[in-house]
Amino acid sequence: MTQATKQIRLTREGYERMQKALAQEQGRLAEATRILQEQMETSADNEDTGLEDAKREKMNIEARIEELEDTLARATLIEEAQDGGRVGLGAVVALSNETTKKDIKVQVVSAPEATVISGGLPRISDDSPVGKELMGRRAGESFVVNLDNGKQMKYKVKTIEY
């Protein structure tokens, strides 16, 4: 099913966010299990839409828990700067979008970490178009990203922090 041998590199903050998400999902699973039990006890044969909804919700939560547990089991933490002055996983990068003339600050992370919702700094995956072009760059370097719609965006790396 999943690639159990492939390591996933996460920042410490990302790892902790995933642990919190797992704990929340486990709490939701307990509640969904309780609701399913109630539905099974009160459901009549001809009225089982609530029962089906409860089963579906429980299965979705179980799948999310399995995904989080798998990611955390394969995680290795990114500690400090690697690649001396180059963009790598965990780097906080200030970019100048030379197309729109706006500056942005993002953190480059692995795909599983990029999907975990957080309220702070925007995270981009190293698998995304911008992330792929950004990896290995140094401050002062410019690069062009080809977007799916055929347009191009030009960026310049201003600073790299870990």
Image (tube, rainbow, N blue to C red):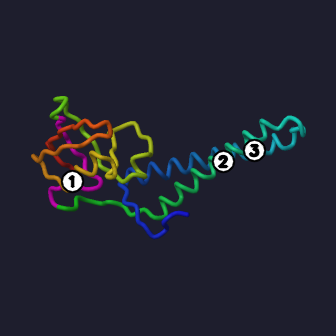
Residue located beneath label 3 in the image: 34
Residue 139 in the image: above or below residue 49: below
Q: CA distance from mark 1 to mark 3?
A: 47 Å
Badge 2 element: helix
Report the label total.
Answer: 3
At a point 31% along the width and 36% down the height, the residue shown is 149
**Label 2 sits on what residue type?**
Leu
Residue 115 in the image: above or below residue 70: above
Mark 1, residues whose alpha carbon is within 10 Å: few (<14), some, or many (≥20)?
A: many
Asked if the residues shown at circle 1 and circle 2 are in contact, with their CB atoms under 8 angstroms apart, the answer is no
Foreground tag (1 vs 3): 1
Residue located beneath label 2 in the image: 29
Q: Which numbered disc flags the more N-terminal residue, 1 or 2?
A: 2
Q: CA distance from mark 2 to mark 3?
A: 9 Å
At a point 9% along the width and 46% down the height, the residue shown is 140
**Label 3 sits on what residue type?**
Arg
Using the image, tell me which numbered label, if any, was put on residue 87. Answer: 1
* Residue sitting farthest toward the left: 140
Q: CA distance from mark 1 to mark 2?
A: 39 Å
Mark 3, residues whose alpha carbon is within 10 Å: few (<14), some, or many (≥20)?
A: some
What is the x, y in percent for residue 123?
34, 43
Task: Tell me which segment is drawn in magenta.
Answer: 84-97
